[in-house]
Image: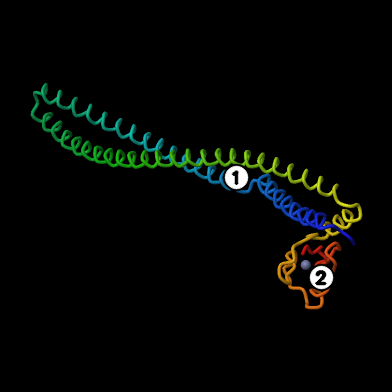
Amino acid sequence: MKASATQQEQVLRLAELDQQISATESKIEDIRDGKLIAELRQVLIHSSERLLQARTELDNIETELRRSENDIELVEKRISQDNDRLKSSSSHKDAEGIQHELVSLKSRLSNLEDVELEILERKENASTELQALSATRSEAAATVQSAEQESASELIKLQSGLALLVAEHAKLLAGLDEDLAALYVRKASRGIAAAKLIGRDCNACRIALTSAAYEEVIATPRDEIATCTNCQAVLIR
Ligand SMILES: [Zn+2]
């Protein structure tokens, strides 16, 4: 089939456009598919769950602390009551009994204070962990948000790029001779429709032509279409 050098260059450009269009379409599909964002959302959900656990843990420790403070308060009250009773007691026997009780109350108070210290320590650790988890969760939320924004703007960029590619493709195809356009469309429906001949290699299938095929391509007049014997792409010399 006859085709001027310009028309052959246009055919090559059309083939490039076809590849760019399909690459752009697949990028758009990837964004719409949203796998990356779904993964980031999973991370966010996981860190929200850990944060909730840490909050519950801290709540429980605080309940425990209040209970321990109550216990201490009760014992302190008893000690103060006993001290008052001791001052006003005139019976030696009663005083002995009260003193005996005071000893055991003071020992109980000391134990309760040890327990309280241990709870306070756990509370501090739980608060620190809660703060760290809260920061991690905020970070994960910000990552999801910025990924969503980036995706949205990338999608707009790709779509407008695609529109330009499609418009150039339509214009070039309309500028081809009718037979050549039909040939191009037929070949494009099967694979890469046209490619450069680089040395002896077809740049569509990346396979070297046999000597005989190469001789034939070289012998083809410049204003005639040459074809790759392997993949049937139009070879632009
Ligand atoms: Zn080929």
Spot occupied by residue 101 in the image (x, y as percentages of width and height): 18, 34
The crowd level at tag 1 (other Cα within 10 Å; few <14, some 14-19, many 20+) is: some
124 is higher (above) or lower (below) than 193: above
47 is higher (above) or lower (below) than 65: below
> Does residue 52 appear anywhere in the picture?
no
**Marks 2 and 1, how far apart in space?**
50 Å
Q: Quadrant of residue 118?
A: top left
**Residue underneath mark 1:** 37
- State the residue at coordinates (63%, 39%): 152
**Residue underneath mark 2:** 217
Spot occupied by residue 155 in the image (x, y as percentages of width and height): 66, 41
Of the pair 180 and 104, the residue shown nearer to us: 180
The crowd level at tag 2 (other Cα within 10 Å; few <14, some 14-19, many 20+) is: many
Spot occupied by residue 230 in the image (x, y as percentages of width and height): 80, 70
Of the pair 234 and 74, the residue shown nearer to us: 234
Q: Quadrant of residue 207?
A: bottom right
Dot in front, 2 or 1 = 2
Quadrant of the frame with the C terminus: bottom right
Sequence-first tag of 2 and 1:
1
Mark 1 lies within 8 Å of ligand 1 (Cβ measured):
no
- State the residue at coordinates (17%, 27%): 82
